[in-house]
Amino acid sequence: MKQYDVVIAGGAMVGACLAIALDELTQHQLHIAVVEAVAADQYGHPGYDARSIALSHGTSRLLDSIQLWPALSSVATAIEHIHVSDRGHAGMVELSAQQLAVDALGYVIELAAAGEIFHHQLVTRPQIDLFCPAKVEHIERTQTEALVRLNTGKRLRTKLVVAADGALSHCCDLLHIGRDEHDFEQVAIIANITTSEPHQGQAFERFTQHGPVALLPMSQGRSSLVWCVEPHQQARIMALTESQFLAELQAVFGWRLGALTMAGERHCYPLILRQAQRLVSHRTAVIGNAAQTLHPIAGQGFNLGLRDVMTLAEEIAAGVKRGDDIGLPTVLGRYRDRRLPDRQATIAMTTGLVNLFANDNPALVAGRNLGLMTMSLSNTLQAPLLRRAMGQVKR
């Protein structure tokens, strides 16, 4: 039975980032296992239908601190301008990288290309062992260690197990860590879109009575669509022909990028806020979507997850330096306590935006549009929301 310092369940972006951050921050002192269910050649949709994710400016800086950003920046599209509006009303906010004196407000990164970069890192770092495809099947915790059995039959011993295996974390289920759920009663429809006018690094978010619609800039002139609709609309919209889909989307989004000329493969998923009831347990920590899954309205999911990663990696590295057992509360309690304020504030901001902009109460409509107009004029009002959206928050 092989001995590890840390076993990470989940080797997608969050789990891979943790393994790399631990390797960097401890100067290669830890022996790390990463267990990932999805084979490397299945990381995403290549070509036009590549899936993507939004990274904040702060996230790019964190990735740079663990030597990942140089490679990832080569497959990232900069967001240089953000336009937020409320359909049918006057309120509007526009932000630019230039006015904030940053290289970019954020970035859009394609998951298939990012997956290749992370996979290369995991298989070339001597202190990291990648078990893929494999799943954690059983976890037994004793006072001094955790024993992990994989579905391949392999058995691993470790000081610490980290659940990084996504929203419906099997690892959390095995460890009896419950989750709280809130159904937003919306469905996200995602696809890649081509427009007649180039996006020029512009990201758009429009709030409609049925939910927000966002277009984020991608490579090759494409934009990544996230369109939130009511559940009863899902089947009808998914069944539309491409031309029907584009016409309906055009009516909702408008003409700021000219005509919508092409739509790739559509996918959809229900929007549910999920929160693990505990971030730590005996010889266990929970990070990323396993810890919390957010509404995509503010694009904060991975950014919040990476702040989990870096905080846990910092506390483990500090514990190693002190000579502590990294699976004990002296280390894990610090991670939990540091993460709670940011986690609660980001969830509150995201959920508050959903509730505000999904509500047709005339007083709220007037208030939010006055708020959008006022924010467009006031740096003071913009600042707190901007700092969180850009990932410039205390961990």
Image (tube, rainbow, N blue to C red):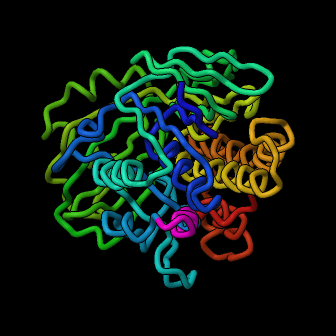
* Front one among 344 and 27: 27
The residue at the far right in this view is 330
Say which quadrant the N terminus sits in.
Answer: top right
**Residue 202, percent from left and from top:** 37, 68
User: Is residue 282 placed above or below 304 in the rendered structure?
Assistant: above
Q: Is residue 283 left or right of residue 139?
A: right
Does the magenta run of residues contain 64? Answer: yes
**Residue 33, percent from left and from top:** 51, 38
State the extent of the magenta-drawn residues as a range: 59-67
**Residue 277, percent from left and from top:** 74, 26
For the point 45% across and 52% down, which residue is it?
Answer: 126
* Front one among 144 and 71: 144
* Front one among 60 and 23: 23
Does the magenta run of residues contain 311? Answer: no
Which corner quadrant of the image does residue 180 belong to? top right
Q: Is residue 251 visible?
A: no
Q: Is residue 165 visible?
A: yes
For the point 38% across and 63% down, which residue is it?
Answer: 72
For the point 69% across and 48% down, which residue is it?
Answer: 312
Which corner quadrant of the image does residue 203 belong to? bottom left
Which corner quadrant of the image does residue 42 belong to? top left
User: Is residue 299 placed above or below 83 in the rendered structure?
Assistant: above
Instruction: Give the dominant element type of the magenta stretch: helix, strand or loop.
Output: helix
User: Is residue 151 placed above or below 379 in the rendered structure?
Assistant: above
For the point 41% across and 33% down, which residue is it?
Answer: 131
**Residue 395, percent from left and from top:** 74, 57
Q: Is residue 36 left or right of residue 49?
A: right
